[in-house]
Image (cartoon, helix red, strand yellow):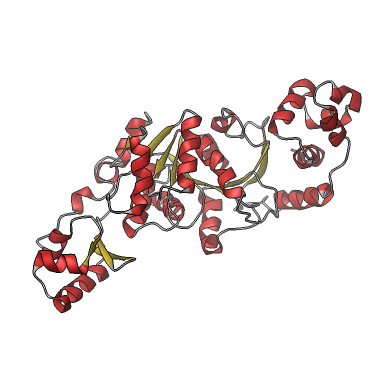
Amino acid sequence: MDRDELSAWLRLVLTPRVGPAVTRKLLSALGSPQAIFDASPAVLAQIVSARDAKALSVRPEGLDAQLEQTWAWLQSGQGEGLAERAVLNWADSRYPAALLETADPPVLLFAQGRLDLLQRPGVAVVGSRHPTPQGKDNAFAFARALSAAGVTVVSGLAQGVDGAAHEGALAALADHPQGGSTVAVVGTGLDRVYPRAHLDLAHRMAQQGVMLSEFLLGTPPLAAHFPKRNRIVAGLTRGTLVIEAAVQSGSLITARLAAEMGREVLAIPGSIHSPQARGCHALIKQGAKLVETAQDVLDELQLQFDAPSGPLLSDTAGVANDSADGDPVLAAMGFDPVSQEALSARTGMGPAALGAHLLELELAGRVSRLPGQLFQRVAQA
C-alpha cells in the first residue's frame, strides 16, 4: 500500500457514519477508496444516503496527523530482524480469510509479526482475568499443546487466562519451531500495550506471533473497545475454548459471538463450588463441547496435523500426574476448594500440623491458597 492509498483508506475509516456496511456498498460500486473520494456528491448520493454522501465530501479532522503517524510506524518496521508491520484492508491477500466470512469484519487491521499466522487454522483460548492457579495452568498447557500441534492460539492479551494462553503457545515453539504460535487481538492502537504488565510478552509476540488491532494508532484502552475486539477473536478462529469464566464474563461474550458466527464453542468443566466454573458449566448446558484434553479440541474442530502424541495432547490437564502419592491431605482434599477446618475433620489432623503440611504442599506447587481461606489441589499440567 503506497502513501496515497493508505491516506484514502484512513479517510474512509475516519469519516463519521461511514461504517463497514456503507463502505462495502461504496467499494462494490466504485472499486477503491480513491475512486470514492474522486466521485462527485451526486454520484455518491446514488449509492448511499445524501447525509453519508455529504460526510464523504468533508476531509476528516485529524487525517493528516494519523497518516503521518501510521506511515512512520510502517516505515520503522522495515529492516532485517524487525517484525513485519502492515495495514491490511479487505482487498489485501494477507487479510484473514476467516474474518472476511463474518458479518462485520473491520475495514482495516493493523498487524505486526508473522502475518502468515493469520491464514492458519486457529482456536481462541479465553477466560477469566482472575483465574484460579489451576485455570491459569490449564490455559498454558492447552495452548502449548495446541500450538505444538500446528494450531494458532488466538486471545486478547488480557491478564489471567489470555496471558497464560499466549505464553503457552510461545513456549511450544522452543521444541516445535514449525508449529503454530499465537495472535493477540488488542483493544488499543498497536503503538500502545495494555496492560503494561504484558509489555515484554507483547514484544515477544511481535517477533514470534502476531499483534493485531482494528484501532488506529494512538487509541487508548477504552472500556468499550474490549467487548468490540472479542468479535475478531471469535472470527479469526474455528472455535472458542473457554477455560474459566464467571456467569457475567467477557469470555461468554466471545463464546456467544462464536456461536452466532457458526463456529464451535468448547469449555473445560470445573468444580461445582467454584464461581469461575459456572460460566463454563452454563455453556456446556447450552450445548458447548466439554473438553478434557487438547486432543478433544482437535477432534471437535476436525483439525489434523503431524502433531506430537502422548501426554502433550491426551493428558493436557495433568490427568496422568494427579495422584495423591499416598499423601493423606491430598487424598482428603480431592479437587474442589476446601477449608482447613473441613480438611482437619476429614484427616483428624490438628490445626498446627495441618497448617504446616498445607504450607509444604503449597510451596511444592501441589496446593493453591484461594480467597476465603480455601485450599485447592493443583493438577500437575
Q: Is residue 259 left or right of residue 149?
A: right
Q: Quadrant of the N terminus?
A: top right
Q: Residue at x 21, y 69 (%)?
A: 340
Which of the pair 283/198 is nearer the observer?
A: 283
Which of the pair 262/351 is nearer the observer?
A: 351
Q: Residue at the bottom extreme?
A: 352
Q: Residue at x 44, y 57 (%)?
A: 160
Q: Is residue 349 above or below residue 318?
A: below
Q: Residue at x 77, y 41 (%)?
A: 10
Camera sees residue 115: yes
Camera sees residue 40: no
Q: Is residue 24 left or right of residue 206?
A: right
Q: Is residue 266 left or right of residue 364?
A: right
Query: Residue 127, percent across and down?
Result: 42, 49
Which of the pair 53/81 is nearer the observer?
A: 53
Q: Is residue 87 left or right of residue 250?
A: right
Query: Residue 333, percent across and down?
Result: 17, 60
Query: Residue 93, percent across and down?
Result: 63, 31
How many badges with numbers are in the image?
A: 0
Q: Is residue 226 above or below residue 42?
A: below
Q: Residue at x 56, y 39 (%)?
A: 232
Query: Residue 257, percent across and down?
Result: 50, 36
